[in-house]
Image (spheres, grey):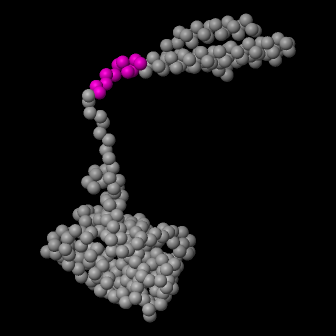
Amino acid sequence: MIERLKEIRAAAEEKIMNASDLDSLREVKVKTLGRKGEITVLLRGLKDLAADERAETGKVGNEIKQALEQLIEEKIAEIKQREMETKLAREKIDISLPGTLIQSGSLHPLSRVANEIKDIFIGMGFSIAEGPEIEYDYYNFEALNIPKDHPARDMQDSFYISDDILLRTHTSPMQVRVMEKTAPQTPVKIIVPGKVYRRDDDATHSPMFHQVEGLVIDESITFGHLKGTLLAFAERIFEQELQVRYRPSFFPFTEPSAEMDISCVNCKGKGCRVCSYSGWLEILGAGMVNPKVLENGGYDPEKVTGFAFGLGIERIAMLKYGINDLRLFYDNDKRFLAQF
C-alpha cells in the first residue's frame, strides 16, 4: 500500500506542476484528495492491515496528503500571480488621464428646510425638544383636550398599535410632555421637529411626513406675541417681506385658534396658479394654548398663558422650492434630488 501511495503521489505531483489553470488544479485535487479520490479510497483499507503496518502506512499517507495540499496551494498562488501579471500587461493605463468623477451627495431638501427652520427659531431663543414617534393615546389626544369619541379625531386618521398606543399623528404631544417636566417654571420656549403619521396618500399628503410644533408659555403672553414671532419666521424662511392674515379656525388644544396665511411668495399677492389666484398661501395653524391643556401639563391658567403653532416641513419646502407634488420628496429620484 505504501508503494501505491508513492506512485499516486508522483503522478499527482507531475499533474500539479504541469497544470496551467485553476480548473486543472481543482480536477487533480478532487481526483487525488477528494472524498472519492485515489488516496482517500486507498486509506480506507487501513482497517484490513496489521497493527504495526497500519500505523506506518497511515503516517506515510498523511504526509503525502499534506505534501500534495501544500503543493496545490503554492501552484494556485503561482497561477493567480501569473494571471494578474498578464492582465496588467494587457491593460494599458494612461496615468495622465483624469480620474473617474465621484459624485458628491447633498442634503435632502426636507433636511435642508428643517435645518433652516431650526436655525431661525434657535435664533429667537427657542430650544429643541424631541419625543417618541410611538405615542400613548393620552398624550396624542386626551391631554390635548381631544377625548375619546371626539369628532376632532376624525381629522387625524391614525395608525393604532393597540387601543392605547399609536404612531403619533402630530408633534403636539410634546406640549404636555414638556410642561409636565417644567411646571411651574417659566418661560417655556420650544420647537419640536419630527416625523408624524396619518393614513393619507396623494399629491399633497403622505402616510409619513414632518412637522414642527412650537410652544411658548410665560406670564402675560398674548396673541400679539404669536403674530410677531410667526411673521418674523415667515419672512426669514422665504427671504422676503410678506403680508400676513389670520383666519379663525378650530384646534381642540388652542383657543382662540387660527390658520396663518402669507401673501403668495410666487406672485407677491397678485394672484397666480400657485395660490389659486387668491394671492394668499396657508402655511400653518396656531393659537393660544387652551387652559385645559395648561392644566393637564401642570400649569395654572390663571397665572400663565401661552401660544402654540404647528407647521408641515413638506408644505414649507413645496412653497419655497416651487414643488407641486409632495411624493417627489420620497421617490429617491436622483434627477430631482440633484437640484438641491
> Is residue 89 located in the magenta-colored stretch of the structure?
yes
Is 260 left or right of 20, judged from the image as shown?
left
Q: Which residue is depicted at the point 26% across and 54% down? A: 339
Seen at 38% across and 74% down, the residue is 126
| Quadrant housing residue 204 | bottom left
Where does the N terminus fall, quadrant-wise?
Answer: top right
On screen, 188 above or below 56? below
Q: Position of residue 92 (x, y in %)?
A: 31, 22
Q: In the image, is residue 311 part of the stretch drawn in magenta?
A: no
Please provide percent x and percent y for residue 237: 27, 69
In the rendered image, is residue 221 in sight? yes
Does 167 sit above or below residue 53?
A: below
- The magenta segment: 85-95
Residue 287, image quadrant? bottom left
User: Which residue is at the front of the view, 234 or 273?
Assistant: 234
Q: Nearer the viewer, residue 191 or 75?
A: 191
Q: Is residue 327 visible?
A: no
- 188 and 173: which is toward the camera: 188
Residue, far left = 270
